[in-house]
Amino acid sequence: MIYDVKYETMSRADMQKLQLARFQKIVNYAYNNIAFYKNKYDAAGFKPEDLNTLDDIRRIPFVTKKDLRDNYPYGLLAVPKESLLRIHASSGTSGKPTVVCYTKNDMEVWTECCARICAAAGITAKDTVQISFGYGLFTGALGMHQGLERVGAAVIPASSGNTERQVILLKDLAATGLVATPSYALYIAEMLEKLGYDIKDFNLKWGLFGSEASTQEMHNELRKRLNIETTDNYGLSEIIGPGVSGECLMHVGMHINEDHFYPEVLDSVTFEPVEESTPGELVLTTLTKDGMPMIRYMTKDITSLDYSPCSCGRTTVRMQRVTGRTDDMLIIRGVNVFPSQVESVLLAMPEIGGQYEMIVTRENYLDKLEIRVEVLDGNLLTDYANLLKLRDKVKQRIKVVLQIDADIKLVEPLTLKRFEGKSKRVTDLRNLK
Ligand code: DLL
């Protein structure tokens, strides 16, 4: 179902007209209400009145995560703190978290955008959806909660953790939908099997997965093991949280709510726009947020845009699955490696599980990559000849895709670390910084 026919099926010309008007408005608003933007634009010689066409936005300076940290916690607010309704934060890997604030208007935009992606993913008022994201400062749980309630679905706010209980709740409450990170959904599927349940006794139909990169192979695996239709959805706290974009049931990319979030995909070296369908770094602008607008925020996420019409009827531009982040990319012996490449190889092999760990070390100035994977059938571990054969097969397939040799370590089923939120697959011990 299309939740907001007016905005989700607008003609390209009308959308661009709307985007330009909103862009001009938000740039003026930020310039006049946030010292950070005024100083940045003045220093760059950019004036809000210079913005006359959508092409002119290329003259606007970027905003980075560092700008949010430097202005911690309230330095980027356009409104008095009293007008806020909600505050979230994303835990940074180092130092202070990134704080994001919502006014009443922002909460409405957020709820509406999440409702759109839930509807696009198949959810209706008839569904009962379990949210297995951690409730708290993380935007994932509460954002999706609001969106699901807006479409009229019943929400089970399970939060993350206690995976055995997640399975029991899904079954006993006859949940029809599951919201989680793909890696946690896989863990839930494994737990369900470990506890001896049969997926046929569950009512699950929809898996709404997001908050971390996932491959097509991971979705295939989740579809098979949970007997559901899966969709990917994308967002980030700095922009709003979940609700930036979501896949429809045609599975041809994630529709961006582009009346609220203006996307650009840029070459990560020149910062010039790339051609349609060419991967680059996603830069987003919030067109309607009034608490903490973000103008040309560099997400570091790698994707491409597709403006071709979608058979679902929506006309909004689609972003392809995020293949990684510019800061996720490992350079191993001079070769660029993304964890998602490893995931595609591993999940395409029926003998091994979907959980993996990548460990990068440096010995005698030479980078080494070790990949730990679980064999699905523990008996194989006592069958040395076949174990070696499987190890060589994985090694060879990894080599074809990554162009480098990796040491493959096959371990017992269910022994690698599981994640209840975003997964962390890579440990880089090289101390490169
Ligand atoms: O993860 C917001 C969210 C919650 C989106 C729930 C979807 C569902 P942050 O914690 O700020 O916000 O992390 C944002 O996560 O820049 C991407 O690198 C990554 N990410 C989010 N969704 C996807 C996705 C939330 N579908 C960062 N595919 C982003 C790939 C994703 N990466």
Image (cartoon, rainbow, N blue to C red):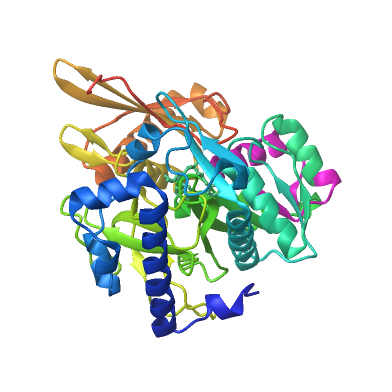
Furthest toward the right, the residue is 172
Per the rendered image, the range of residues in magenta is 171-199
Residue 188: x percent and y percent?
66, 39
Residue 52: x percent and y percent?
28, 74
Furthest toward the top, the residue is 364
Residue 175: x percent and y percent?
78, 51
Between 223 and 178, the residue placed more toward the observer is 178
Q: Is residue 122 left or right of residue 354?
A: right
On screen, residue 156 above or below 154: above
Between 185 and 55, the residue placed more toward the observer is 55
| Residue drawn where x is 37% and y is 68% of the image | 24
Split into 4 quadrants, where in the image is the C terminus? top left
In which image quadrant can residue 197 be found?
A: top right
Between 290 and 383, the residue placed more toward the observer is 290
Between 327 and 99, the residue placed more toward the observer is 99
Residue 358: x percent and y percent?
37, 29
In which image quadrant can residue 325 be found?
A: top left
